[in-house]
Image: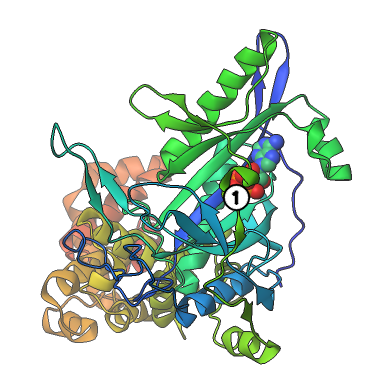
Amino acid sequence: MLDLTYDAPKPKVIQGAKSDWELVIGLEVHAQVATQAKLFSGASTLFGAEPNSNVAFVDAGMPGMLPVINEGCVEQAVRTGLGLKAEINKFSAFDRKNYFYPDLPQGYQISQLYHPIVGEGEVLVELGDGTARLVRVERIHLEQDAGKSIHDMDPNMSFVDLNRTGVALMEIVSRPDIRGPEEAAAYVGKLRQILRYLGTCDGNMQNGNLRADVNVSICQPGQYEKYQATGDFSHLGTRCEIKNMNSMRFIQAAIDVEARRQIAIVEDGGEVTQETRLYDPDKNETRSMRSKEEAHDYRYFPCPDLLPLEFDQAFIDDIAATLPELPDAKKARFIADFGLSDYDASVLTAEAENAAYFEAVAEGRDGKLAANWVINELFGRLKKEDHVIGDSPVSPDQLGGIIALISKGDISGKIAKDLFEIVYTEGGDPAQIVEDRGMKQVTDTGAIEAAVDAVIAANPAQVEKAKQNPKLVGFFVGQVMKATGGKANPKAVNEMVAAKLGL
Ligand code: ADP
Ligand code: MG
């Protein structure tokens, strides 16, 4: 467990025409479970397949077909719960949520209303200003995704693609603990990071594999504290739910514009009606989609086709034993073991693959130097070419080799950059390249002295000036570095120049 004191929430305050308003936000994140097969059928979950090619009879709602639970999805949900330090419910059950959509041919979605698989958990959310706070997770339940209706391919017809129908989703429901647009984005980002570490969802928001329903309400200052003290939601304003957001940027914009819409209504003497809305990024506005349904509108009832899920402690313990080191723990360890700054540790632990790469480079070497090189040189270079760490032409061994040469004083920082470029584009063993191409730093004082003498002899006017103004030493150092092709040890040159000029 991290030793952190959590910061009090700093609600985003929006000034209305009449008074100040605070934001209250709760998120329902739908995360597609990373598995090969769907929740209740053996059909593939592969993205981008030919329409309607990944559809089992049960997904298509064929009469008499029965769902069969995919144990892999259950394990992934438990793993996710453990990663969010949540209570795992050894008993959970599936319910039918009845509604009709052409892309949900069963006529109902199988979900878990009454007995979700995971209970209370938490997400540590770090904010840009260096503060961190806990957002509570209320529950996680398993449910089926719907398919896709396509209305824009033909002027007279609509099409349905059932590939996604029945794919397993985890719905991760937060408490209304989020207090501003940036915090909402940071929460989604952190959740995504944890899921990716766990390997339970790939977090690909573009493909819709991670998307959020964003609940927004406004309240007067002081009201949220009353809600927190009592758990009584009547202290809060009426919420609107903005459906299916799959971009961090739009989540923030939608919250802001929705809060302002609600403030205008309330200050005008009106009331916010609870409803489901859609965000239109082109117009930067939210629009009513449908009035909010209550649970009874869906006539939820226990799914008669599926037994409840029951498992014992050993099942949970086995999954717990395979949990990887998670982002918070890894970051804390990087700070403690490698002496990294909070910022560098955050960057390096953003993705598990990046962290593993860094560790391989830093092991037994100067951690801070390794962090600088991985973040500034390698990540910078990869980003320029739109590459991820898996595409890196430089292995941890090679980058470690460069760093070792710097630490030993064999090469200067400047030469190291040239060397990095060679290794990046041509490959090879850094030490060998330095040897073969004569890139070794000149630490031999005789050679440096000769170069210093030559530069001093060639610049008598500068010598006079430098004697008046010692800052001009830099000119000579620069000239010597140039003359030695950047290979002289800058520290040695500096000392020698100062000594020769009697400074
Ligand atoms: P539903 O499925 O009906 O939308 P859920 O219980 O699944 O209901 O989710 C409700 C979400 O709305 C939760 O994330 C919760 O934190 C959030 N929420 C509840 N009340 C408010 C409120 N007053 N303001 C903002 N968010 C709220
Ligand atoms: Mg919900």
Q: In which quarter of the image is the N terminus?
A: bottom right
The correct choice, above or below, for 196 with respect to 210 in the image is: below
Total of numbered circles in the picture? 1
Q: Residues within 10 Å of mark 1 (few under 14, many from 20)?
A: few
Residue at point 36%, 21% (across, down): 283
- Extreme-front residue of the structure: 64
Report the front residue among 202 and 309: 309
Say left or right for 332 vs 44. Answer: right
The correct choice, above or below, for 483 with respect to 74 in the image is: above
Say left or right for 274 vs 457. Answer: right
Corner quadrant of residue 64? bottom left
Residue 236 x, y percent position in the rendering: 76, 32
Residue 408 x, y percent position in the rendering: 37, 81
Can see residue 344? Answer: no
The correct choice, above or below, for 297 with respect to 188 in the image is: above
For the residue labelled by badge 1, is the local secondary structure a helix, a strand or a loop? loop
Disc 1 residue type (three-letter): Arg
Q: Name the residue under label 1.
A: 299
Report the front residue among 160 and 470: 160
Residue 450 x, y percent position in the rendering: 21, 69
